[in-house]
Image: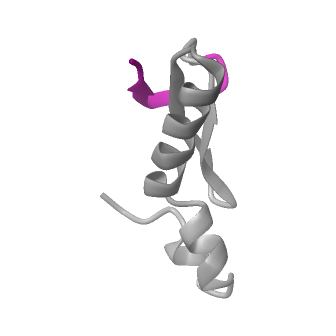
Amino acid sequence: MTDPLASLAHLSPKRHALCSRLHAQRLAGRLMDQLGRPMAVIHTGNPLQPFRVGNCDGGEGRVVLEVRT
């Protein structure tokens, strides 16, 4: 697996950490606990925001992980 931010090495290490899949997984878990509904980690294909958290419908990109109770 290649790192989507590898070509953007000039960006800060903090941005790299905040845009990681691991951070998105943690956020999805916290949102699921607060909202009481399943959340998904979505791969966007955008190197500036490679992962985001959203609904499990996958309408925004490819769902790589679903967080459910």
Q: Position of residue 24 (x, y in %)?
A: 53, 48
Q: Is residue 61 magenta?
A: yes
Colouring style? one colour
Residue 57's image quarter? Answer: top right
Of the pair 68 and 44, the residue shown nearer to us: 68
Residue at the farthest left position: 1
Q: Is residue 57 visible?
A: yes
Q: Is residue 32 left or right of residue 25?
A: right
Position of residue 51 relative to residue 22, above or below, is above
Region rendered in magenta? 59-69
Position of residue 16 relative to residue 63, above or below, is below
Of the pair 17 and 11, the residue shown nearer to us: 17
Of the pair 55 and 31, the residue shown nearer to us: 31
Q: Quadrant of the N terminus?
A: bottom left
Residue at the spot 66% in from the left edge and 25% down from the top edge:
60
Residue at the spot 54% in from the left edge and 17% down from the top edge:
56
Q: Position of residue 64 (x, y in %)?
A: 41, 33
Q: Is residue 21 magenta?
A: no
Residue at the farthest front position: 34
Position of residue 28 relative to residue 60, above or below, is below
Of the pair 58 and 28, the residue shown nearer to us: 28
Q: Position of residue 45 (x, y in %)?
A: 59, 45
Residue at the spot 46% in from the left edge and 52% down from the top edge:
21
Q: Quadrant of the C terminus?
A: top left
